[in-house]
Image (tube, rainbow, N blue to C red):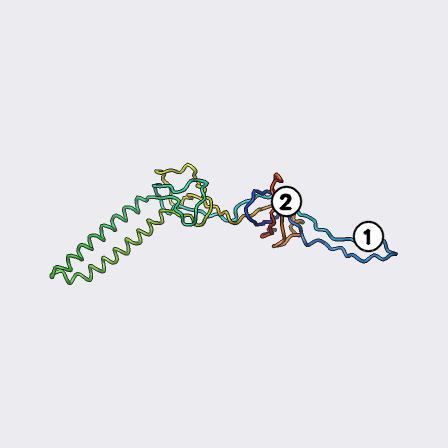
Amino acid sequence: AAGVPAAKTSAMPSPLVSWEVFSKTMQSVTSSRLSSADRHASAVPLPWPVQASGILRPAEEFMVYALDSARVEGLHARDGQHVEKDAPLVTLSSMLLDERRAMAVSRVERLASQADAASVAVQLRDQIQPLQARLDMARTALRGLENERGRNMPRAPASGVVRFEDPDLRVGTWVARNELLATVIGMDRWQVEAYMDEGDTRRLKIGSPARFYAEAGTASPIEMSVSLIEQ
């Protein structure tokens, strides 16, 4: 419902879908010693559990995009596979980038040949420095294209489980510029989001202890803490 606040907790992974947090902001009841003439019972404050259902989800997800319109040349991971950080996921081939690289390679080879010829021909020695400068610029441009070409092999930004946007992605498929290719789901940090009444959230605070239980009740509870409260 609109205006219903949410509380978020975090913990280690476990197949849990509900949580319970014991609020420490209860109203206290003052107790006093009982005398032999006064038989009124003393009141002892007890924790009042705040309960809500929630969904367990990874706290970190990393998106992997195609930087240019390209053709899939190779797949290095399967959908649902665990990968390490910097592991290659896909090899892409951009026709435009390949053409630019081929032209840059040809230019470097031509200038290198001219510089070699100028170094042995007396009548061309005055051209050695200009040729060498042009050759250095051509090599710098080629290195830039090589670096750009390397970006056509997207890698995992972090360790985790890779989920391809298209589970049927295969060699020969064309992808668009900035198209989402995959999501790498970190497995080290998890969180649970739960919705509850506003009155309950007022009894919570960041750092309040929480306890998660499996829906089926078969797993031991997991100790957690509140990390975010949205009003």
Query: Furthest residue to the top?
Result: 168
Residue 107 is left or right of residue 181, and the answer is left
> Is 9 in front, or is 224?
224
Residue 178 is left or right of residue 61, and the answer is left
Query: Furthest residue to the right?
Result: 37
Q: Residues within 10 Å of mark 2 (few under 14, many from 20)?
A: some
Which of discs 1 and 2 lies nearer the camera? The answer is: 1
Residue displayed at 61% across by 38% down: 216
Point out residue 6 in the picture as x, y percentages from the top left corner: 60, 48
> Which amino acid is tagged 1?
Ala
Residue 170 is left or right of residue 5, and the answer is left
Query: Do the CB atoms of the residues marked 1 and 2 lie less than 8 Å apart?
Result: no
Q: CA distance from mark 1 to mark 2?
A: 33 Å
> Which amino acid is tagged 2?
Ala
Point out residue 144 in the picture as x, y percentages from the top left corner: 31, 54
| Label 2: element kind | strand
Nearer the N terminus, badge 1 or badge 2? 1
Check disc 1 and report the residue beneath it.
41
Residue displayed at 27% across by 49% down: 101
Point out residue 183 in the picture as x, y percentages from the top left corner: 45, 45
Q: Quadrant of the N terminus?
A: top right
Residue displayed at 36% across by 40% down: 174
| Label 1: element kind | loop
Residue 207's disc is none
Q: Residues within 10 Å of mark 1 (few under 14, many from 20)?
A: few
Q: How many marks?
A: 2
Residue 52's disc is 2
